[in-house]
Amino acid sequence: MSKGAKNGSKADTKKDDIEKLFLAPSSEIGRFSPHQIGRGSKKGELGYTGLNQSYGWVFDDILRKLQGTNGQRIWREMADNDATIGSFLYAIDTVIRQADFNIKPFSDDQEDIDRAEFVQTCLHDMSSTWADTLSSILSFIPHGFSYHELVYKKRLGRGRRRGAVQSKYNDGLIGWKKIPVRDQVTLVNGGWEIDENGGIQGCWQWGPPLYKRVFIPIEKALLFRVRTNKNNPEGRSMIRNAYRAWWFKQNTENIEAIGIERDNAGLPVIYAPASIMATDASPADQAIYTYLKKVATNIRNDEQAGVVFPSDIDADGNSMYKLELLGSPGNKQFDTNEIIKRYQNEILQTVLADFLKLGQDKVGSFALSSDKTGLFIMSLDSLADQIESPFNDFAIPRLFKLNGWDEQRTPTLEHGPFKKTDINVIVEALSKLSGAGMELFPDPEMEAHFRRELGLPTKDDTEL
């Protein structure tokens, strides 16, 4: 064998080793020696995401109480019970539900246009409306994630037999029957299947009404998340940074309510003989003492208010038992109303929705409101992008595959603008552009654009 052949053989062997290294799973990397890895090791996946998880349990939040099922229940309590958080969640839900979500064709070819139209019809041919589906997807805002199962159907029109799958279309193609959410509380505790490289393979569900353990693979699901740091399947709640302010606000409100009740009803004070409070008191005296404590703590100033007390007097003619209601001595040192307002502002600031409070305290200019609203609109755009990505990356390509179409030519889901057009701003801009010498009309494309922006009727192509 020639020297060249020998060198060629060694080179081929080294190339094969490196290719095996690049394609090998992380668990097999250790069998390669350092000289085999060499400088090409940067192309292989050797490290980890760093997600704190074990056997399907995720422990990534710094506060233990916010992990797992307990954390999901806290997010639900914050979303359902707090007026401040509920207000901006409702604002987000309302604006996004009213946005236009349309399917953009892959190209201008008629076949691509027809298939984009097919996907558009699938969005509005489910057992739940597209707006309701969007609303369930938006549960990922407070919970950090929402997991949805893709359920398919064959479009065979409106069947007459009981239980038949209904469709507005009778083309025999496969579409979406529904994309229902799987309750976050039923998924999180040990439910995630995560491979050695941090890839999400699916999740196990267990909960009402059947309480059966069911595996939902990621190939049959869509996972929506606010943030995907370290590929955490549970994402990160959008109201996570508001938790501390919410906790203090809630406790301040509870203390305030107790204070109002005590101020209105008075603080109950019962005077009784010391003998019934002694450690060596008789069982009868101990029972009286227990009863009096119960009376003091349960007094409420309502329609059932009333106390019956003994009229016993001592040898000096003084009452042995006496009940008084002490009033508040004066103004409190802290203004709970201002404290609660501070926490409300902090909660709204964490989601860029503090513009909702502008004007309530007789402060805040129009310019400030416009700037803050703009930031909020930008956050809505980001949330809409998080909704579109799973559809464009997974749902639509899988739908194409089931129908036997080219998965490389899929259309995309895109949302329209959220910001409502200010007519005065557009008119002023047009006036300045015209005054600067810019020729605006006749320009069919520009005229069509401004008509859309102003919500005016569009002209037919023959009129433009």
Image (cartoon, helix red, strand yellow):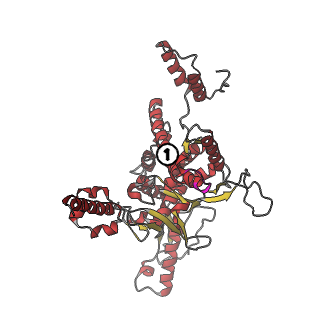
Answer with left or right where residue 26 lies relative to residue 226. left
Q: Position of residue 372 (x, y in %)?
A: 45, 37
Q: Residue at the right extreme?
A: 160
The image quadrant where one finds the C terminus is top right
Residue sitting at 55 percent across and 63 percent down? 183
Q: How many numbered tags mark residues here? A: 1
The answer to whether 206 is drawn above or below residue 22 in the figure is below
**Which residue lies at the image location 26% right of the left edge and 56% below the top edge?**
40
Question: Is residue 46 in view?
Answer: no
Residues shaded magenta: 401-406
What percent of the width, then of the height, locates residue 212?
A: 58, 74
Could you tell me residue 97's position as x and y percent?
A: 59, 45
Asked if 445 appears above or below 214 in the picture, the reply is: above
Residue 59: quarter of image? bottom left
Q: Is residue 241 magenta?
A: no
- Amino acid carrying label 1: it is Asp
Q: Which residue is mark 1?
A: 385
245 vs 158, left or right, is: left
Residue under the image location 57 percent in, 16 percent down: 441
Is 324 or 136 nearer to us in this picture?
Answer: 136
* Viewer-closest of 144 and 261: 144
Q: Nearer the viewer, residue 164 or 1?
A: 1
Element assignment for label 1: helix
Furthest-front residue in this view: 1
